[in-house]
Each structure stands twice: as structure tokens, then as C-alpha cells.
Image (cartoon, helix red, strand yellow):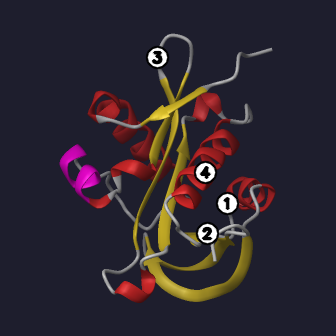
Amino acid sequence: MTAPALVVPLTATHADEVIAIYQAGIDEGNATFETAAPTWEQFDAAKMPEHRFAAVDATGRVLGWVAAGRVSDRCAYAGVVEHSVYVHPDARGRGVASALLKALIASTEAAGIWTIQSGIFPENAASLAVHERAGFRVIGTRERIGRHHGAWRDVMLVERRSPVVS
């Protein structure tokens, strides 16, 4: 049995591993429309520091990460964030994504955020399942929303509405 991951705040010390895990997800083809991972500086600027976490093993190796960014600067959307969660291919099936989503939910609720949302390719069944277990629901499918490697792709919009933030 593998020891559980420790979830810690994601900082610049994790940068290289976070970006490598992001690129691995991109390379697999069902994680994002992106074709190359951002630089650490781009990632850092786009993600809210108080709502990003790394899952690490006993040696400090990053197994996965979760991070959220604002969906809009408009005050009406102050309580809505969009997140991404990525797990290293070797660490999948060990509860890493669930632990990361749990940390994200706790941090966002503590901050008064009422909605966490994301877009997931329908082919990414594992991501859809872990999100459902974490209390997310599919609110719709955005059909043929964008081209990815020359093919139209659908995206399922998922959200989790906080039961404690009103």
C-alpha cells in the first residue's frame, strides 16, 4: 500500500515539477486545449496563491497539483473561480486528485468562494469521476467549443456550489 500524499501550499519550490506534470497532461491529449505548458512566471501570475496546492510524497516529490484563478474581475463574480487539477501519470489511482480537490474546496469556502468550475473533455472519464465524487456536477456540454490538433472538441462544464457559502 502506498503512503498517502501530503497536501501543501504550492510554491515556487515546486515549479519545475508542476510544469512538468502540466506538460505530461498536455501531451496525453485529453487535459486541455493548451499545446505547451506555461512558464512558471505565467502560471504564478494566473493562479491565486491562496488556492493552489501540491500533493507530495514522503521524499517531497510532487505527485500532483491543483490551482484556481478568477473567472472575471467583475465584482459579481468575486465568488467564482476556475480550477485545474493534474496528477503525475505514475501517481494516478492513489487518491491524489481527491486530496487536492478537498484542499481546494476547504480553502475556497474559507475565503467565501461559492462556486468552483472547470471545463473537462468528455473523454477524460477519470477526471469527471473524481470531480463527481468531490461534489461537482455537470451543468452542460459546450459542443464543438474549440479545435484541438485539428479536430473539434466538446467540453463538459462542471461546477461545485458550496453548501456553506451563501
Residue 64 is marked as none
To which residue does mark 2 refer?
A: 121
Q: Determine which residue is flagged by label 3.
A: 60
Q: What residue type is labelled 3?
A: Gly
Q: What's the residue at 34%, 49% (across, down)?
A: 49
Whether tag 1 and tag 4 are in contact, CB under 8 A, the answer is no
Q: How far apart are marks 3 and 1 (CA)?
A: 28 Å
Residue lying at 74% horizontally and 56% vertically, measured from the top left: 134
Mark 2 or 4: the one toward you: 4
Is residue 28 highlighted in magenta?
no
**Image x and y of residue 92, in percent:** 67, 35
Distance between the alpha carbons at the discs numbered 1 and 4 = 25 Å
Query: Does the magenta run of residues contain 43?
Result: yes
- What amino acid type should be assigned to the residue bearing mark 4? Ala
Q: Which of marks 1 and 4 is in front?
A: 4
**Real-space Cα separation, disc 3 to disc 2, in angstroms:** 30 Å
Mark 4 Cα shell of 10 Å, populated few (<14), some (14-19), many (≥20): some
Looking at the picture, tell me which residue is in the foreground, 153 or 116.
116
For disc 1, the neighbor class at 10 Å (few under 14, some 14 to 19, many from 20) is some
Q: In this view, does 155 lie above or below 57?
A: below
Residue at 78%, 62% in the rendered image: 132
Mark 3 residue crowding within 10 angstroms, few (<14) / some (14–19) / many (20+):
few
Q: Position of residue 48 (x, y in %)?
A: 35, 56
Residue 106 shows which numbered tag? 4
